[in-house]
Amino acid sequence: MKYSNVNNLDDCIVRALTFDEYSNEGSDYSATTLIKSPQQVILQKENDNAIVQDVGDLVWARFGTAIHDWLYRANQNEKDLICEKRHTITVKGKTVSGATDAYHTIKHEVIDYKTTSVYPVKDGKVKPEWEKQLNTYAYMWIASGYSVRSLKIIAVLRDWSQSGLLRGGSYPKTPIVSLDVPLWSEQQQLDYITQRVDVHKKAEVEYEMLGTLPPCSEEERWQQPDKWALMTKGKKRALKLYSKEEDAEKALAKSTNNYIEHREGKANRCERYCPCNQFCSQYQNK
């Protein structure tokens, strides 16, 4: 990967932002790679030398790394915790690895640290990809002879604020929250890992033999649905948004001096977070 520095950040900052010690230690897939779409994984691997990322876009990723390092250093000598342990398993002839932030030997609990925004956690829910990731880790611990009774995410909320807290509702009371993650059965965990290995293996064979890639699903693309906005002439703000065009048409028929504006749903991951969208025919031909 190549880096740009559009905003002319200082050299010391650029070095820090581009410093990355991550390694999957030669495994075919990591726990997080399994979650990604095969198309993204293959395109990123094939175009790694051509992908350009601005260093300013790496700030929050490196902030997350710094939080992990701080928590590791503070807890590495605790007798009840095993910190930063990497496991590797073999499934369908492929090696899958995962590094767990911490394992509590008394509670038999797998713990993962996340640096995220308030929005994903404000209702106390766990993102589906987090649930998949932690259950993959759990299976790795079980395969290594450990017992796993619970899964937990400790989330550091980078945009938490006192003003948000004053608004009440489901806003987190502190900038650090703990989330209990649903624990699957051991068979469910293995079935998930096997299914994802099969999906990635099939995509690799298809790409090698035919040069084609399976498209990303709407879920993988974070695709937002189309909306139809009931607008008033001369104003920019919608009176109301509708999920169906016919509902918007009915509302329009009952109003005057209004019109309907179609707002195409965006694929947020593709547009904002995928480093290889410039090489993706699905994105380019949207």
Image (spheres, grey):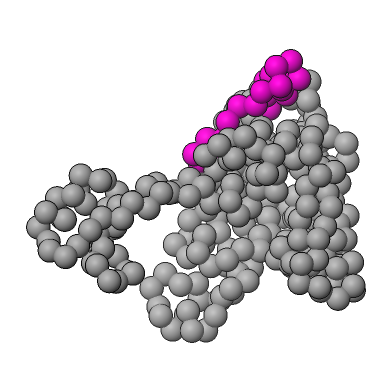
User: Looking at the picture, does residue 256 appear above or below residue 162?
Assistant: above
Residue 147 seen from this side: no
Is 213 one of the magenta-colored residues? Answer: yes
Please report the residue visible at 42 percent of the width from the left and 69 percent of the height from the top.
170
Please report the residue visible at 68 percent of the width from the left and 59 percent of the height from the top.
113
Q: Which residues are magenta?
A: 200-220
Q: Is 263 left or right of 152, judged from the image as shown?
A: left
Residue 272 image offset from top left, x and y in percent: 60, 54
Residue 173 image offset from top left, x and y in percent: 50, 76
Q: Where, by quadrant of the figure, is residue 198 drawn?
A: top right
Closest to the observer, 162 or 76: 162
Q: Residue furthest left?
A: 254
User: Looking at the picture, does residue 273 appear above or below residue 284?
Assistant: below
Q: Main secondary structure of the magenta part?
A: helix
Q: Residue furthest top?
A: 209
Residue 55 image offset from top left, x and y in percent: 78, 63
Closest to the observer, 225 or 158: 225
Residue 59 seen from this side: yes
Q: Where, by quadrant of the figure, is residue 27 drawn?
A: top right
Q: Is 264 left or right of 241, judged from the image as shown?
A: right
Q: Is 136 left or right of 261, judged from the image as shown?
A: right
Q: Is 271 left or right of 169, judged from the image as shown?
A: right
Q: How many marks?
A: 0
Residue 233 image offset from top left, x and y in percent: 24, 67
Is 179 one of the magenta-colored residues? Answer: no
Please report the residue visible at 48 percent of the width from the left and 60 percent of the height from the top.
124
Please report the residue visible at 68 percent of the width from the left and 44 percent of the height from the top.
278
User: Looking at the picture, does residue 27 appear above or below residue 233?
Assistant: above
